[in-house]
């Protein structure tokens, strides 16, 4: 019994959905960023699954690029979050609507 | 391999779902770390050991620790956690869960034509020689992207010198 590509892609789709639900439901910037990380991981799982079913390395190479993009994104986003927290003493995304200057 | 995949993917989905619905940031991040390690096991099950190792090192090792560091710097006030807890009812997740379920169903339906099985693991040598062969420009650009992220973070974290000079 071998593992099929549809199972891997189904797992990636549901994981992406979990991340999307967290992004929509939460108002804490920290959890919104964590949900975005979950969605990044789901995309990576899809790439690696296709790479494994084709028996080629290209999907895994793309996973490394996704990894680099996620790391760069989260570092800048967390710095922005800390900046926002230093200004308004909260990480509530609803309060970010009153940002200016 | 198949059993490993099913156990690890179920664990990853459950831990991610629990992790994004915790009121306390530390609890949520620990569940998220568990989910990320489980995804690493999924990578092992589909025959990508190099990806599994990098995934655990970078996501569970670096990114979750970065989140924990942000929590440490921002500080956790008990009133904020209590306010978050009152806001997090099952009702708050109803609409997002419906929308996300529709999105996941669409993605699954779109990937229906994909067929094929996960055969032999791709050797690490193949991945490494692809990274440092035809994809070397991409690797260098990824390094530049991380460097740009470093510079942006440095600028964002800078204390506001203009404001302090005005006070003098």
Image (cartoon, rainbow, N blue to C red):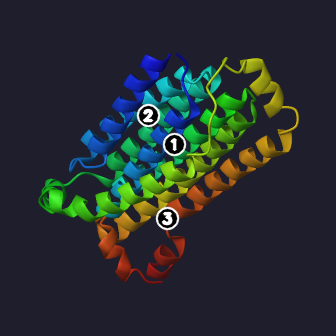
* Mark 3 / mark 2, whichever is N-terminal: 2
Q: Let me know if marks 3 and 2 both belong to one chain.
A: yes
Q: Chain of mark 2?
A: B
Is A67 displayed left or right of B40 in the figure? right
Q: Let me know if marks 1 and 2 both belong to one chain.
A: no
Q: Secondary structure at mark 1?
A: helix
Q: Residues within 10 Å of mark 1 (few under 14, many from 20)?
A: many
Which label number is shown at residue A41? 1
Q: Residue at x 56, y 28 (%)?
A: A4
Q: Secondary structure at mark 2?
A: helix
Which label number is shown at residue B100? none
A97 shown above or below B77: below
Q: Residue at x 77, y 41 (%)?
A: B139
Query: Quick one: A76 or B33, which is closer to the camera?
Result: B33
Q: Residues within 10 Å of mark 3 (few under 14, many from 20)?
A: few
A52 shown above or below B151: above
Q: Residue at x 31, y 48 (%)?
A: B20
Kindly report the distance in space between the C-alpha atoms of the residues bearing marks 1 and 3: 33 Å
Query: Quick one: B150 or B37, which is closer to the camera?
Result: B37
Q: Chain of mark 1?
A: A
Check contact, mark 1 vs mark 2: CB within 8 A: yes
Which label number is shown at residue B159? 3
Q: Residues within 10 Å of mark 2 (few under 14, many from 20)?
A: many
Measuring from the top left, give residue B160's x and y in whole percent. 50, 70
Measuring from the top left, give residue B168's x and y in whole percent. 46, 78
B85 shown above or below A49: below
Q: Residue at x 33, y 54 (%)?
A: B74
Q: Secondary structure at mark 3?
A: loop
Query: Quick one: B70 or A10, which is closer to the camera?
Result: A10
Look at the image and tell me whether residue B126 can be seen. Answer: yes
Residue underneath mark 2: B36
């Amino acid at each position: 019994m071998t593992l099929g590509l549809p199972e891997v892609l189904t797992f990636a789709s549901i994981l992406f959905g979990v991340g999307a639900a967290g992004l929509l439901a939460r108002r804490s910037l920290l959890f919104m960023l964590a949900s975005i990380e979950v969605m990044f991981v789901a995309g990576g799982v899809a790439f690696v699954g296709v790479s494994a079913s084709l028996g080629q390395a290209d999907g895994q190479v793309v996973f490394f690029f996704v990894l680099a993009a996620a790391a760069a994104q989260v570092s800048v986003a967390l710095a922005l979050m800390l900046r926002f927290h230093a200004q308004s003493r909260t990480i509530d995304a609803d309060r970010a609507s009153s940002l200016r200057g | 391999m198949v059993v490993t995949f099913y156990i690890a993917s179920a664990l990853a989905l459950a831990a991610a779902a629990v992790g994004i619905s915790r009121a306390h940031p530390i609890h949520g991040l620990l569940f998220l770390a568990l989910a990320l390690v489980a995804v690493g096991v999924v990578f092992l099950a589909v025959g990508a050991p190099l990806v599994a190792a990098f995934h655990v090192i970078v996501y569970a090792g670096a990114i979750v620790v970065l989140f924990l560091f942000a929590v440490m710097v921002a500080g956790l006030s008990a009133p904020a956690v209590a306010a978050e807890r009152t806001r997090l009812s099952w009702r708050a997740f109803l609409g997002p869960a419906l929308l996300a379920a529709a999105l996941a169903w669409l993605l699954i339906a779109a990937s229906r034509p994909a067929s094929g099985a996960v055969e032999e693991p791709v050797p690490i040598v193949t991945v490494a020689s692809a990274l440092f062969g035809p994809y070397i420009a991409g690797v260098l650009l990824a390094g530049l992207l991380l460097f740009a992220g470093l510079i942006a973070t440095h600028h964002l974290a800078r204390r506001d010198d203009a404001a302090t000079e005005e006070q003098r």
